[in-house]
Image: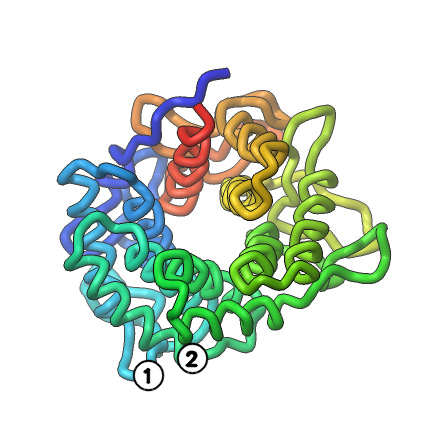
Amino acid sequence: MTAPAPSFAHLARLTDDTGLFEHARHAIVRRQHGYCTDDVARGLVVTSREPDPPAAVLRLGECYLAFLTHAQDHTGAFHNRLAHDRRWSDEPGLGDWWGRALWGLGTAAAHSPAPWIRDEALVAFTLGAAQRSPAPHAMAFAGLGAAEVLRSQPDNTAAATLLADAATAVGTSGETPEWPWPQRRLTYANAALAEVVIAAGHLGGDDRLLASGLGMLTWLRDIQITDGRLSVVPVPGWQRDAPRPRHDQQPIEVAALADACATAAAATGESSWDAGVRQATAWFLGDNDVRTPMWDPATGGGYDGLTPHGPNLNQGAESTLALISTLQHARRLS
């Protein structure tokens, strides 16, 4: 199964001169729901990852960076929700959106081909990196941004400290082989927790921490494989010692697993991790529990969720970004 090249056509459709709209009905943007920092940050991640972006993709990255710097306050915290009338509907905080903002900023600071984007992203990242969130997921996302900065600037102490603190916030693998996970429940973007522990161990030269993160990811990958295909933990999550639900599965879970497997492959040099990237790609192309494609080739948009009856045909920002991110990893393997 040959993976298509990542397309930014639908992402451009969801973007105006302010930012990235969160929701769509089928492929048509729903402006009434406004923008959110979570998705804009993910947009900055994927646009910054493009090795030789055309001018249109570079402009998307500039737009997303401008949104994030507008969302950030003087303490390094971020607003999350901006209405279509350009008014914030919340106060600055340190939730997941703070972590994802730092992920996007760190990726842009490390990888954008435009020096003016790299410079401004690093300024905003450094301000945000002085904060800490009480939420492990938020810390994990922030830690992934810190890891990107460290890969390009190994002496960046703010990034190194944030990455180490993120791994501590997540915790290490549990004591029982049946559930070697730091928490008693799998929730959302689970693989990001394992990924940040892997990155902290690898970049910090801590072999025990690296082994713990790889063990977490091995278990998570294995429990999400059914008959050779990917079947990710769905929206309700999965509590230890409880029956595992199967639907609704979200593209963000698939993309998080692809990200983590790509990081594990880079950290270990073991090509066996590439299988996880290929399974994630295949999930979008139709090798999933319902045997149906999870994207629209005509628009380039990703479908919002996999239900027992087929895909949710809405093509919102989160699902489209998950598709693009996964196809970027697949391109590396082609």
Q: CA distance from mark 2 to mark 1?
A: 8 Å
Q: Residues within 10 Å of mark 2 (few under 14, many from 20)?
A: some
| Position of residue 144 in the picture relative to residue 152 (left or right) | right
Residue 3's image quarter? top left
Residue 243 image position (x, y, % from top left):
81, 46
Who's the residue at 64% across and 56% down the image?
210
* Depth check, front residue: 12 or 258: 258
Rendered position, 158 above or below 301: below
Who's the residue at 37% across and 52% down the image?
42
Residue 241 image position (x, y, % from top left):
85, 54
Who's the residue at 60% across and 30% down the image?
275
Q: How many tags in the picture?
A: 2
For the question of whether residue 90 can be seen, the reply is: no
Residue 282 image position (x, y, % from top left):
54, 25
The residue that mark 1 highlights is 75
* Depth check, front residue: 286 or 218: 218
Image quadrant occupied by the C terminus: top left
Q: Give the amino acid at mark 2.
A: Gln
Label 1 near label 2: C-beta < 8 Å? Answer: yes
Residue 131's tag is 2
